[in-house]
Image (cartoon, rainbow, N blue to C red):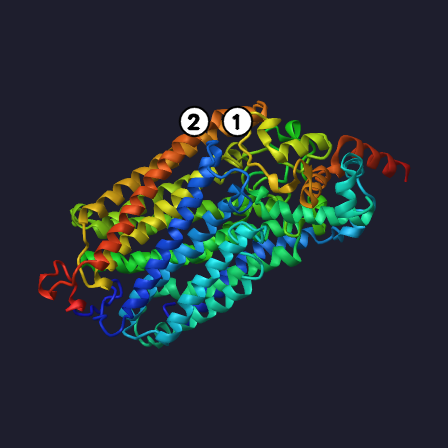
Amino acid sequence: MTPVASPAMPVELPGRKLVDRPIVKAHFIAAFVFFFASLFSGLFYALQLSRIYPFPGVELLSPGRLRMIHTNAIAYGFLMNAFIAMMYWIVPRITGEPVLNRKLSWFVFWAWQAIVGVAALGILKGHAQGIEWGETPTYVDPVVLVGGAFLAANIATPILKVRHKPLYVTLWYFAAMLVWLPLTYAMGNFVPQYFVPGAGGAAITGLFIHDLVGLTVTPLGWGMVYYLVPVILKKPIWSHTLSLAGFWGLAFFYPLNGVHHFFWSPIPMYAQYGAVMSTIAVEIVVFTVIVNFFMTLRGRGDALRTELPIRWFYSGMVMYFLTCLQCAFQTTLTVQKVIHFSDWVVGHAHLVMFGVFGSWILGALVYVWPKVIGKPWWSERLNVWNWWLATMGIMVMFIDLMAAGLVQGYLWQNLAPWEQSLIASMPFWHVRTVAGIAIISGQLLQAFNMWMTARAPAVEPTSLAGAEPALT
Amino acid sequence: MEKLKFILFFAGLCCFAIAGILSAVLPLSHLSHIPYQKLDQLVTEPSYDFLDLGRRYPEQMKKYYGEATAASFREALKIGRDSYIAEACWHCHSQFVRPVSNEDVRFGKVSWAAEYMNEMFLPHLFGTRRVGPDLIREAGRHSNDWHAAHFFDPPLVVPSSVMPRYTWFFDGEKPNKRGLAMIAYVQWLGSWATPEALARKEQSSAAR
C-alpha cells in the first residue's frame, strides 16, 4: 500500500526493518501469562462467592488477596503488555522511524514483567496497598514510574521525529497517554497513601481509578483501533475532524469524572454534582467515536463476517457503547442510591475491561500474531470459537451481574436482613461462575492456537494466504 | 491545534491539571479547616473491647502486646488496619454510611468528613463494594467472642456468609497478634459515633 496523504488514513509503511517483531511477540506472550493469572484468580474468587472455594484456610491463596491479583494482573500485566506490544507494532509504521533503542525495549520488557510479577507475589504475601487499582505494594510504585519513563522515551522518540506532517489521531492518543500515565500513577499511589486522608484522599483515588481507565487504557485502545480498522478495511477513517473532536472530548471530560466512584460519600457535594455532569458529557465523546467507526464500516459490513479482527473490534465497540450508555444513567445520584456497592458496578467494570479492551486486544492479536510469527494461524476455527465464547460469556456475565445488582440494591434499601441479600445473590453468582468458565475456555483455546501456530513448520512465503505486503 | 507540542501541553498537562484542581484541590481546600490528628492524639486510652480481649485471652495478650495500655492499643489498631488492607477486607466491606437508601437506619449515623481526618484513614478505606455490610459503625455491634468465631469460620455465626476463613489469625483456637489486632480494629471502627458516644459528646459541648 502506498502512503496516502490524507490525514484520515494512517500511513502504513513497510514494517520489515522498522518493527522489532520479537519484542511484539514477547509482550503478547507475557500478556497472556498474566491474563491467565488474572482469569484464574477471578475464577477462584467467584468460587468463594459460590461457597465452593478449593483452598479454604490457606493464607497465601486467600480469596481476598487473589481478588487483587485479578485486577492488577489484568491492568498492568495483560492490558499494558498487549498495548505496549501494539505500540511497538504501530508507532514505527505510522512514523517511519524506529523506536529509540531496541536494547532499551528489552530492558523495559523484563523490567515490566519483574514489576508485575513482584507486585503479584507481594500481594500474595500480604504487602498490598489500600488503593483500588493501585494495590501494587508501595515498594513497587517508584520502580513503575522509572519503567514508565523508559517506555515513554522509547516510544515517544519516533513520534517526536515526525515534523511538518499532520499527525494521525493514533499518535495523538499514544503521545498524550505517555504524559498521562506517569502523572496518574504518581498521583494515585502517593498522594492518598502519604499525604491526604479521608474524604480528600477518596476524591484523589477516584480521580486515579478513573484516569487509569480513561487516560491510559482508553487512549491506548482507541489509538490502536483507529490504526487497525482503516488498515484492515483498506479505507480511510470516515472523518478526521470527528476523530479529533473525540480526542479532545476524552482529554477534557474523562479526568473530570473521578469523584463518581464515591457518590453520597463525605466528599463535598459540589464535586459530586460536577462528576455527574462531566460523566454525562462523556457521552458526546462516545457518540463521535462510535459514529465515526460505524460510518467507516458502511459499505464494508461483510468484513464483520470475513475479517475476524474487525468483528472483535466492532463487537468491542458495541460493548463500549453499551457501557458508556449505562454509565450516563448509573452516574446519576438517583440510580446510585440503589446500585452503588452492588454487583451492578462489577458487571459494568467487566464489560469495560474485558468486553471492550479485551476484545480489541484479541482482535489485534488475531491480526498481528501470524505476521509476527510469519505463519498463518494453525486454526482459524479456534479463533472464531474464542470470539463466540468470550462475547457470549461476557454478555451473560454482564446481564447477570446487572440483575444481581438490582436485587441486592433493593434488598438493602428495603432493610431486609443482610444475609437475605447473600441468599438472593447466590443463583446469580453461580451463573457468573459459569460465564467466567466460558470466557476462560475461550482464552485457553486462543493460547493453544498461538502455541500451535508458533511451533508449526515454517511455510513458503508464497503460500501465505492474506499476507500483508510488509511481509514479502 | 494539530501540533504535537500543543497536544502534549494542552491535552497532556492542562486537562489533567484542570481535573485535578476541580475534583481534588477544590474539595481538599474545602476540607482543610478540619484539623488532622495523629494516632496518639486520636487514641488516648485502650478501648473497652481491647481490655476485654485481655481478660478473655490473657496469655495471648501478654505474649503479643504485654499490658493492655493506650500504647499497645495503638499498636494493635495499626496492625489491624494493615491486616485489613493486606487481606483486602475493604474490597467487600465499605467504610462509609450514605445519607440514602435507609443506610442510617441499618448502620447508624451518616458519615461526615471530620471523622476521617486522621492517621487511621491514610489511605482512606471507603471501599466501593459491599458483599458484606458496611463496617464504619461496627463498634460494639457484636461481642469479641462473636468476632473471634466469625474470623475463624464465618458460617459458624452467619450461616449464609460467603466470607473466607481467616485461620491464620489464630494460634490453634485463640487469636494471635493479628487476630487480636483485627478484633480490636473492627471494634474500634465507629466507636466515636455510637449513640452513647454521641450523647456524651453532646452533653460535654452543652456543658461548655
- Relative height, residue A352 to residue A344 (above, below): below
Q: On what subunit does the disc labeled 2 rest?
A: A
Residue B15 coordinates in the image, percent (x, y): 49, 60
Decide if residue A447 is on the left or right side of residue A156. Answer: left
Location of mark 1 (residue): A421
**Placement of the C terminus of chain A among the 4 image quadrants:** bottom left
Q: Which residue is painted at 77% across and 39% down in the image?
A: B50
The picture places residue B99, in percent across and down from the top left corner, at: 63, 34
- Mark number, residue B197: none
What residue type is disc 2 on?
Pro
> Which residue does the image show at 52% across and 34% down from the upper left?
A334
Q: Residue B32's spot in the image, x, y percent? A: 71, 54
Residue linked to disc 2: A427
In the foreground, A162 or A120: A120
* Image quarter in which the N terminus of chain A is found: bottom left
Q: Amino acid at mark 1?
A: Ser
Do badges 2 and 1 share one subunit? yes
- Using the image, name the chain to which the residue with label 1 belongs: A
Q: Secondary structure at mark 1?
A: helix
The answer to whether any part of residue B27 appears in the image is yes
Left or right, residue B153 beside residue B140: left
Q: Earlier in the sequence, mark 2 or mark 1?
A: 1
Toward the left, the furthest residue is A462
Q: Residue at x 37, y 59 (%)?
A: A30
